[in-house]
Amino acid sequence: MPGVSVIIEVLDARIPFSSENPLVSKLRGDKPCIKVLNKRDLADPIRTAEWVRHLEKDKYVRALPLNSKDSREMDDLKRLVSSHMPLVTGKKVPTAMIIGIPNVGKSTLINCLAGKIICKTGNVPAVTKAQQFIRVSPSLHLLDTPGILWPKLDPLECAYRLAITGAIKDTAFDYNTIGPFACRFLLRDYCQMLADTYSEKITSELDPDMLLELIATRRGCYVKGGMLDTAKALEVMIRDLRKGTLGKITLETPEMIKIEDGEAGKLEGVKGMAGRLERKRLKKNPDRETLLYTTG
């Protein structure tokens, strides 16, 4: 990353790990990196503090929770960026590269830094379409990059969280795929918020179907014939989570990610061993034409 003095990576404070590009740490080397935990107003403050401590274990990283729509909080970011910038010499103006996944609030943050509308914003993924240089001040330029998702979202729970928070377009996934995951998580970690928002009958012992039936009843989600529309109820719940109507929610913790990474590693190990055994067996039986993968 020649010519770049500092990297600003904008993360979603509700999913700091899932919204973090795994390639950044490999590419930046020892360049200072400011990880902005944006949308902190929607996130669980206790878990946000956990993530700040976790991220700053890397000596080159500073983590800053903020709400990019609050101009007062943007002053903290400006001071932090300035503290990492070299002195201006001659005509060379220091550049900060700003990166982030779709719909993480990167464009809003840039507009606040610049003090004027430079980037188009919207509550949908992929508003920024091309790389561009932005003159924030005489002593600072920003290199803005389009929000992209990397090809392999691993572990799978990361993809679910990205979909739940809106980083993945609603047209790119089936709500029924993320529904059970979202319901089980909220029942386990934020059950009281569900009860306060939808029904006092909601308890952590419910299964996802029972939860959605109670939400459908409360919000009047019915299909023709008077049947409960649980698919619509799920959309209502996800929309309420995204807007903060349910309360301040964070969908992952450092400890959760550690456990999921371990489980994903074990699964890959099992798949790899199964594949090696199958290849050995085929060598002994070369006439067999079809390889049946039992590991998916």
Image (cartoon, rainbow, N blue to C red):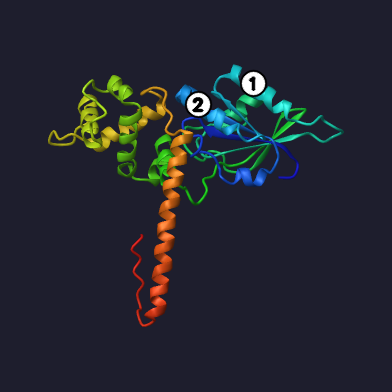
Location of residue 113 (image quadrant)? top right
Residue labelled with disc 1 = 76
Residue 144 screen position, x and y as percent: 64, 38
Kind of element beneath mark 2: helix
Q: Which mark is residue 95?
A: none
> Residue 117 versus residue 10: which sits nearer the camera?
10
Which of the two labelled residues, at mark 2 and mark 1, occupies the earlier sequence position? Answer: 2
- Residue count near mark 2 (Cα–Cα under 10 Å), binned few <14, some 14–19, many ≥20: many
Q: Which mark is residue 48?
A: 2
Q: Residue furthest left?
A: 225
Screen quadrant of the C terminus: bottom left
Left/right of residue 104 with respect to residue 93 in the rendered view: left
> Residue 163 versus residue 43: which sits nearer the camera?
43
Q: Residue furthest top?
A: 72
Q: Residue at x 60, y 16 (%)?
A: 72
Residue 163 screen position, x and y as percent: 41, 40
Location of residue 229 (image quadrant)? top left
> Visible in this render: residue 39?
no
Left/right of residue 208 with respect to residue 283 in the rendered view: left
> Residue 252 versus residue 12: which sits nearer the camera?
252
Residue 239 screen position, x and y as percent: 36, 30
Location of residue 251 (image quadrant)? top left
- Residue count near mark 1 (Cα–Cα under 10 Å), binned few <14, some 14–19, many ≥20: some
Screen quadrant of the N terminus: top right
Spatial CA distance of label 2 from label 1 is 17 Å
Q: Amino acid at mark 2?
A: Thr
Q: Residue furthest bottom?
A: 287
Q: Residue at x 47, y 40 (%)?
A: 258
